[in-house]
Amino acid sequence: MHLKTYSVMIILCVLAISLSACQSAPSVVGREITADKGTYYAVSVEELQMILEDKDFTMINVHIPWQGDIEQTDLRLAYDQILDKQDQLPSDKNQKIMVYCLTSGMAKIAVESLLDLGYTNLWMLEGGTTAWEEAGLPLVKE
């Protein structure tokens, strides 16, 4: 083998290894939203599916009337009762909390209430259970 050919092959191998090292699993970032009392993140159905694989958060369905839960939901707490029932919420104000409702309207109000209570790591499913079902995913209905 010629030295030039050998050198080109080494360069190509190094390049291939470098490029594959740069590719990693997609990270969930969400879309940052600024509210009056702080910031929170809106995630898509696809992003929520990814983070549910290694769930490290409390997930709350805030929709009323109840119409079904996304699997792995931890709590049902009506969006307009968060301030009255804050004893059901995580005591650590920095714990990650994901809220959702039917379309996002009630979830946005719930996030504002949670920000008022001092919670700092808030997430919301964009489009709510409507988007979840439109993606062909089931709700748990008792």
Image: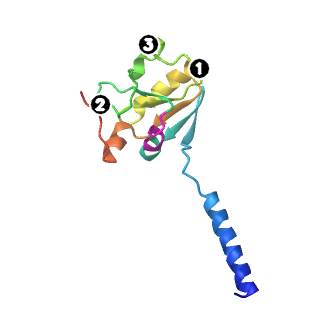
Where residue 1 appears, as percent x and y from the top left, is: 69, 87
Residue position for label 1: 118
Per the rendered image, the range of residues in magenta is: 49-55
Residue at image position (59%, 58%) is 23
Residue position for label 2: 68
Where residue 5 appears, as percent x and y from the top left, is: 70, 84
Q: Secondary structure at mark 1?
A: loop
Q: CA distance from mark 1 to mark 3?
A: 15 Å
Q: CA distance from mark 3 to mark 2?
A: 20 Å
Q: Nearer the viewer, residue 9 or 130?
A: 9
Mark 2 Cα shell of 10 Å, populated few (<14), some (14-19), many (≥20): some
User: Looking at the picture, which amino acid does disc 1 mark?
Assistant: Gly
Q: Secondary structure at mark 2?
A: loop
Residue at image position (51%, 33%) is 123
Q: Earlier in the sequence, mark 2 or mark 1?
A: 2
| Quarter of the image where the C terminus is located | top left
Residue position for label 3: 85
Mark 1 Cα shell of 10 Å, populated few (<14), some (14-19), many (≥20): some
Residue most toward the bottom?
2
| Residue 3 picture quarter | bottom right
| Residue 33 picture quarter | top right
